[in-house]
């Protein structure tokens, strides 16, 4: 899906205007954050934060390895 977007001046910055199709596909609304991820093909715009996802997965792994300690902490 190749959808053209317009680049506009927003204060001292530049912004893009997303079409309704793109907004619905991304599942975002006004005020949501999008992440611009540099890829070999260009920039990918996504509501998914890969750094946050990595941090969550790392935390889950830690909790799995220390399940007994987590269970004891939950009792307090």
Image (spheres, helix red, strand yellow):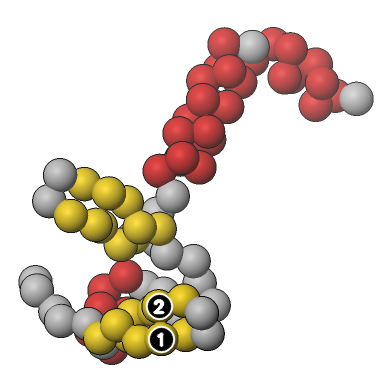
Q: Secondary structure at mark 2?
A: strand
The percent position of residue 53, horizontal first and vertical second, equals: 46, 40
Q: Along the line of sight, which residue is nearer the eye, 61 or 21?
A: 21
Q: Along the line of sight, which residue is nearer the eye, 66 or 59?
A: 59
Mark carried by residue 9: 1
Residue 47 visible somewhere in the drawing: yes
- Residue 10 in the figure: left or right of residue 76: left
User: Residue at image x 25%, y 86%?
Assistant: 6
Where is the C terminus found, in terms of image quarters? top right
Residue 18 visible somewhere in the drawing: no
Task: Specify the farthest residue to the left.
Answer: 1
Residue at numbered disc 2: 14
Q: Secondary structure at mark 1?
A: strand
- Residue 73 in the figure: left or right of residue 33: right
Q: Quadrant for residue 8, please give it.
A: bottom left
Q: Quadrant for residue 63, please give it.
A: top right
What is the CA distance from the residue labelled 1 to the residue labelled 2? 5 Å
Q: Is residue 31 above or below residue 71?
A: below
Contact, CB < 8 Å: mark 1 with mark 2? yes
User: Residue at image x 22%, y 82%?
Assistant: 5
User: Residue at image x 27%, y 49%?
Assistant: 38
The percent position of residue 66, horizontal first and vertical second, equals: 64, 11
Report crowding for label 2: few under 14, some 14 to 19, many 20 or more residues within 10 A (C-alpha). few
Task: Specify the farthest residue to the front.
Answer: 12
The percent position of residue 67, horizontal first and vertical second, equals: 64, 15
Report crowding for label 1: few under 14, some 14 to 19, many 20 or more residues within 10 A (C-alpha). few
Where is the N terminus found, in terms of image quarters? bottom left
């Amino acid at each position: 899906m190749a959808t053209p977007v317009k680049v506009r001046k927003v204060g001292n910055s530049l912004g893009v205007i997303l079409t309704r199709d793109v907004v619905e596909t991304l599942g975002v609304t006004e005020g949501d954050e999008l992440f611009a991820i540099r890829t070999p093909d260009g920039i990918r715009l996504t509501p998914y934060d890969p750094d946050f996802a990595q941090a969550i997965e790392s935390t889950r792994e830690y909790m799995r390895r220390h399940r007994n300690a987590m269970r004891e902490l939950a009792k307090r």
